[in-house]
Image: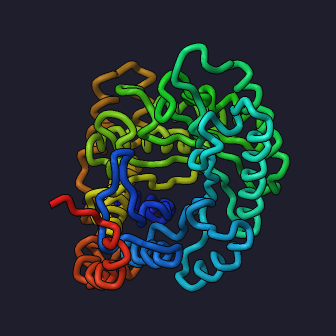
Amino acid sequence: MAENTEKAVWQALDRFQIELPSWGFANTGTRFGKFLQAGAATSIEEKFADAAQVQQFTGACPSLALHVLWDFSDGVRSVTEIERLANKYAIRAGAINPNLFQDQQYKYGSLGNLDPDIRKQALRHLVDSVEIARRLNSRDISLWFADGSNYPGSANIRHRKEWFIEGLRATHTELSPAQRLLVEYKPFEPAFYHTDIADWGMALLFARCAGSQGKVLVDTGHHYQAQNIEQIVAWLLSENMLGGFHFNDRRYADDDLTIGSIDPYQVFRIFHEIRSYEWETGQPADIAYMIDQSHNLKLKIEAMIQTVETAQELYVKAALVDHAELSKEQASTDIVAAEERLKAAFHTDVRRAIRAWRRSKGLPESPLAEYRRSGYQSRIETERGVKNLSSVTSYA
């Protein structure tokens, strides 16, 4: 590998970080049920401990996104415990995720609910989440809403839009100057007729209506089949409204598969658009990268490490694109040469350069293989197995 190529790989890896999700270490499933794992995390401390393992072997995941209802057993009063765990495991608290889709009162929506008392309750939860984030020095409050309707005529879509704007503006007023409100979108599920924030345009409108610290959060699984996600990325970058990414992969819809397992070229194209923007503007894009995957069959920590390794490879491949030459090819309408330039970067084998970078950082050359040799997985399966598998029902 040429010296300048290896230099580009190292520079890209030095700056690339991706946040881990606390819920990705716990037992999760589909609406049909769960397949339990003996080593899944059963407490917030175990989630921090597992995240520390991923950081130890990859060096790219210094923070853990937290879910308010799942990780803060005592609401705002739990902040002290989170701070203790963050210090103990050297993993800082990342994005704070409110939960407005789980409790029974949100059957017909949260900020979009017809009942003003339920809308007020939802707003109180959002304000509490902002306070939790402030106390933990967490910049981003990530918002995903399940709000919508399942049958035509069953809800006033325009009224719901206005209620959302009202609630997001009220939440925005609680932000400190350093905080951001990230608005996520999803076209369907659990609402199957209309979703109140169904696409990036709606999220963009809501983020702008919320206030100057509102941004859009893109989840790679939250799109219709064949949607050009990198075009959405380019537009949001152009509008200075891309705040964060939830990375996963999918075959059909929001499948939450590990990144790059189905379409690695798509992830590469997304990273390319970001790198292209940075080259043109001469400034780094302020984007919070995060994994948002549901590991029902793969072992949790192994899947996280595998995901990080893949994300690093695809990110550095995008860093190899010569944007100066690509710009010339675009200007001369040399379509074949421009496409070949992207394909050449995508097909470059960057693994040796990544291994060299890891050696220079005191990291294992093969994080997944080293984790498998560490014995941590067998230990947590022994320690947590009884608690995790005690609820398993057998129909034999």
Q: Is residue 68 above or below residue 58?
A: above
Q: Position of residue 297 (x, y in %)?
A: 26, 58
Q: Residue furthest left?
A: 396
Q: Is residue 176 visible to the viewer in this orientation of the structure?
A: yes
Q: Is residue 109 above or below residue 353?
A: above
The answer to whether 235 appears left or right of 213 in the picture is left
Residue at (60% x, 26% y) in the render: 201
Question: Image quadrant of residue 172?
Answer: top right
The answer to whether 47 appears left or right of 160 in the picture is left
Of 177 and 351, the residue lying toward us: 177
Residue at (40% x, 34% y) in the render: 326
Residue at (58% x, 80% y) in the render: 85
Residue at (52% x, 47% y) in the render: 245
Of 361 and 248, the residue lying toward us: 248
The answer to whether 376 appears left or right of 369 in the picture is right
The type of colouring in the image is rainbow
